[in-house]
Image (spheres, rainbow, N blue to C red):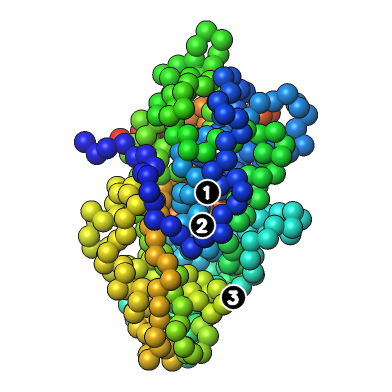
Amino acid sequence: MAPSPFPVPHATVPFWRTELHKLDSYQSTPKLTEKQDIIIIGAGFAGAALAYYLSKNTLDSNLKITILEAREACSGATGRNGGHLRPDIFNGAASRMRKHGLEVANEVAHFELENAEALANLIRSEGIDCDFTPVTSGTAFVDEAEATDAKILWDNMLEKGSPALNQVTYHGPEDAEKVSGVRGAIALYTFPAAVIWPYKMVMHLLEAAVVANVNLYTHTPVHAISPEVDSEGYWTLETARGTTKARRIVFATNAYTSGLLAEYADAILPARGTCALVEPTATGGPPPMRSCGIATKSPNTMDSYWGARPDGGFIVGGAGSYRDQPELWRGNFDDASLIEPAVPFFKQWARKNLVGWEDAEMVMKNVWTGIMGYTPDDLPHVGPVPGREGLYVCAGFIGHGMPNVLLCAKAVAKLVKDNYPLAKSGVPGCYETSSERLRKVT
């Protein structure tokens, strides 16, 4: 039996965590508060957004809210990603159409676009300093068979009707390489996106919540939850710093969810990924697109992807060279060690993939691993935990949380605080966690 996933100590250090916020290892009080109304487990994007919305414009000034984080704030998947806000309105939509039908594909694509707009507006309205830069992103195909398959899906979706594709532009063999900067690209699908410093964005939301009297306790891993509430209606949480209680608990725990909720053991699975910051030691080649992915298997598998940094470096993720060794990533929640086959991949990435970069010398400034929460149906789990009143989940974002988390968290906050139905908040119905979805994977 595989061990239950929990955050490990001494994790690799991602580039995003090289400028630490004052709340990075914050603890609101020397001892945990004994009882509170709401506990959020996890201080990544989901946990921070939940706390932000739960504490914002609340009519109940006495509502006691606490965030418990196993390690440092934003030290999990959000603080280790590729730095993109990239709605997946073609490749991901095509994959969902194959798996769940066109209606679900369209609903999710629309929701991701709404999330991207909502996050961009929040960053602007709050004045969040997080290097937020709108860009044109894309997916480049370099294999003829895969490019053909993708074009068939593109034509099929256009024929059936997919409104999100109005924001996607197709480039064929005549200009795909020139537009993308990817050597040998024979098809390219471009769409609006953004690059971002995710840690800085999350820490701003956390700080706003702490200012609004939300308690934050980092370095406080939760080891177990009581099987039921006590006579006063409180759930009991066993932590590394003692016992605490809450009437409602939200699990913003992503890949680690089944460590505390065993019913999600087959529903949210940890998967290890890797990213690196690479920079040219001298003049590189002509600049490629600011953000792009190179697809090797349509419609939704990336060999690598990148986001360009203002200083000329690239945040590169994917490194598909290790995918044929599942023990290195599938079910693996060790982000304290590197995926060794990826290291030479990153060193050679620009030379092998970018037009005009054949002789470029690159230096690898940072390389790190991170743990994503994958689901068998490729959909997040959001909403009340089935059969356990007072417990809620906002997790399983399949390595694609940036264009999904914000509005999911906002909806769960309204559900927890006001019992406002998820469906009325605009969260896709297919995202809602349920006994049926859990049964399908057991």
Q: Position of residue 150 (x, y in %)?
A: 42, 72
Q: Which amino acid is tagged 3?
A: Pro
Q: Which quarter of the figure has residue 66?
A: top right
For image coordinates 66% across by 29% down, the residue present is 417
Query: Can residue 263 be seen from the camera position used here?
Result: no
Instruction: Check the image and report above or below for 302 versus 257.
Output: below
Q: Which mark is residue 294?
A: none
Relative to 414, residue 275 above or below: below
Q: Secondary structure at mark 1?
A: loop
Closer to the N terminus: mark 3 or mark 1? Answer: 1
Tag 2 residue? 17
Left or right of 215, for residue 78: left
Mark 2 closeness class: few <14, some 14–19, many ≥20 residues within 10 Å: some
Q: Is residue 336 visible?
A: yes
Residue pictured at 56% horizontal, 10% vertical: 232
User: Label 3 to label 1, Cα distance in Å?
Assistant: 23 Å
At which x and y percent is residue 160?
Answer: 53, 64
| In-front residue for pair 238/268 | 238
Mark 2 or 1, nearer chain start: 2
Question: Dividing the image into 4 quarters, which one contains the N terminus?
Answer: top left
C-alpha span from label 2 to label 1:
9 Å
List the residue tagged with mark 3.
310
Give the residue pinned by disc 1. Answer: 74
